[in-house]
Amino acid sequence: MLAKPTTVYILQYSKRGGLAGCKFCPQSATNAACKDYVSRIPWPIVPLNRILKGIKERGNFARICIQSVIKPEFEDEILKIVSEIRRYGIKLPVSIALTPVKSSFLYMYKEKGVDYIGIGLDAATPEIFYKIGKPYSWNKYMDFIDEAVEIFGRGRVIVHLIFGLGEKIKDFVYTMKTLYEKGCEIALFAFTPVRGTHLHNLSQPEILKYRVVQIARFMFSKNLRKIPDIEHLTQALLTSGCPGCNRPFYNETPRKIYNYPNAIMLERDKAKLIKEISTALKMVDINKLVG
């Protein structure tokens, strides 16, 4: 295996899919996609106790991430899942990937020991947000992001953004900058077309444009004012997200890797990636872009 997952991802189950209408997501009840998938990854239906027993027996993971699905009482179900994790004596850090919920739930999740919150904003502009069918409103997400940062602290709210939905690089980078100023981190995803979704005919983004936004995210995250040397900049291509999250091949096949899941694979492709980064840096004035 080229890369093993370092996080256990637990997706809430909903037979007909979630109530959100996201046009890119197989889990949306508004499309004909197979509900076994999120992005490229199949998620088999497995009893929670079996998952937790497996985690206890193997013990070689860095984190557990609960992936929420909008359905009746999903917020309460998340609380039960976290409680079960702790009842089994599992001490791994726990993240939750969420859409906006009442702040009272955020406080309860934190009290249960959840240390990071992921927020699936996904779109980098309000126009694309509405175009792709995100639930709620752009302003509701922004308010929720602020609430989450206030409750969990700066650097502990990871906003998910998908590049390749039709946005301009400068708009994408501007939104990343705004979110970093709010105290967030960014988890970058490359758009991945999935059969049966409303966006299944949309192509994946150009790899060099994706490299530009990876470099910009890296510079924001490290608070860099100038571009570091290119060898150091290859670190920007590692998967971004919560500590311990590597999401191997979530967005890609092994032939065209957008997010590298580990340093071993990064080193393997180092020469090729240095060329990609060099070419990407010629496309834009990155210092001006992030300034």
Image (cartoon, rainbow, N blue to C red):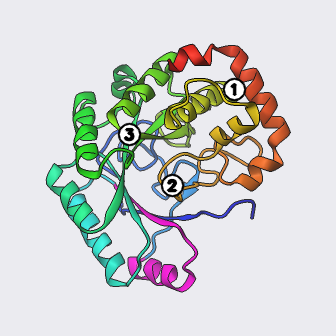
Q: Amino acid at mark 2?
A: Tyr
* First to last magenta residue range: 47-68
Q: Is residue 11 above or below residue 259?
A: below
Type of residue at label 3?
Cys
The N terminus lies in which quarter of the figure?
A: bottom right
Q: Residue at x 35, y 38 (%)?
A: 183
Q: Outermost residue toward the right?
A: 271
Where disc 1 sits, the SS reads helix
Q: Which residue is mark 3?
A: 184
Secondary structure under the numbered disc 2 in the rendered image: strand
Label 1 Cα neighbours within 10 Å, binned few <14 / some 14-19 / many ≥20: some
Which one is earlier in the sequence, the residue at label 2 or at label 3? 2
Task: Residue 235: name its quadrant.
Answer: top right
Q: Earlier in the sequence, mark 2 or mark 1?
A: 2
The residue labelled by disc 1 is 208
Q: Where is residue 22? Give x, y as percent.
A: 38, 38
Residue 106, percent from left and from top: 22, 55
Tell me whether circle 3 and circle 1 mark residues in contact (CB < 8 Å). no
User: Mark 2 — residue?
Assistant: 37
